Amino acid sequence: MKKWVVLSALFFSMAIKCQESPYNLKEDPDRPRTFIFPPLISLILPGFDQHVEGQSSYGFGYSGAAAVGLGLVAGFSNYSSYSLDSQNDNARMYTLGGEIFLASGGISLFHSFKTAVKSRKGDFLFLEAEESPKDILLSPINFDYLSRPTTYLGIPGVILFDLLITSIFKLDEEDRSTSWHFKPTDVFFAATISAGAGISEESFFRGWMMPATNYYVKTPWVSNLIQSAAFGAFHLIKYKFPISQAIAGYYFGWVAQKNGWGIGESIFIHTWADVVFFLLGYATGPGENKDYTLYVPLNFSF
């Protein structure tokens, strides 16, 4: 397990420590870039647009981390049917591999979008925040955000609202354990999987979709509403009624817009709310070895 995590961290560090300007336009700098297809391709093929734009160090960092993630998914594919709140470490390595790949794609998409924005002078003046890939990758552990009411009230607010919605609409149809199945690796997996989810989902929905939509609708609250609806729809894969996810998505978008359309604080809130959800899932879930192919977890995790 350690070698895979170390490899992923190594490739990500290539992007963090890169000395070149993140969004440097090396070839044909006066040509406006499209902000739709190159970011989306980079989501699926992390590093794609960075290689195209000559931002090679970043491209290799994202591509390498994505390859590590796919290696984990392939190596632990026999455990793909386990639920997210299973405490089987092999199943959690499968999930972690997926999150590493998604985080690589998410930040590559964000990087591609920011490069396009730099080439389109005057089109995205509402994007006041300046965030580098390093800022995005380190956002989950930027505890300076805890000094902000939007964070120290937002995290418990998101958690309590989700639990309330789950209770009212009876979204949890499985019997839950009342005992804590604690393992030393619980916190590690909860933190790493949550950080991956925070980075990938915030980069896509609040870092790309929301500003890209606002370019066309010219109304921040409408662009926020559209991305939050899409965020809720994204969770239909997992939940029948992703009400709390859609509302939380709107809150994350509101926080981002409040911060000059920067997504760092939203990533932090998203990550640490998910940490709590995962730990609650581990505490009341199926435990170590039970294989729940059709298991429906609590309405946890954004």
Image: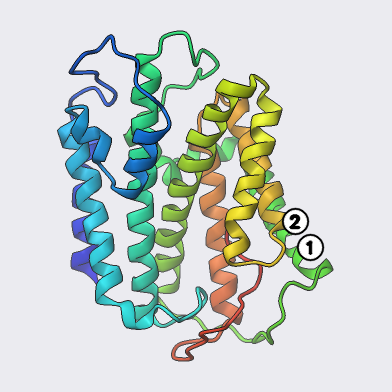
Judged from the image, the secondary structure of the residue bearing numbered disc 1 is helix
Q: Quadrant of residue 237?
A: bottom right
Rendered position, 243 above or below 30: below
Q: Going 52% across and 61% down the picture, which residue do you hit? A: 275
State how far apart marks 1 and 2 are (Cα): 5 Å
Residue 262 image position (x, y, % from top left): 51, 29
Callout 1 touching callout 2 (CB < 8 Å): yes
Q: Is residue 89 above or below residue 18?
A: below
Q: Position of residue 70 (x, y in %)?
A: 27, 63
Residue located 47% across and 58% down the image? 194
Q: Quadrant of residue 289?
A: bottom left
Q: Is residue 191 left or right of residue 21?
A: right
For the N terminus, the image quarter is bottom left
Whether residue 137 is visible, yes or no, is no
Give the amino acid at mark 1. Leu
In the rendered structure, which amino acid carries the disc numbered 2?
Phe
Which residue is the site of mark 2?
Answer: 161
Residue named by callout 1: 164
Q: Residue furthest right?
A: 168
**Nearer the observer, 172 or 231:** 231
Q: Nearer the viewer, residue 258 or 249?
A: 249
Residue 130: % across, % down: 42, 22
Residue drawn at the location 46% of the way across and 54% of the way down = 197
- Residue 176: image location, x then y, percent: 66, 84
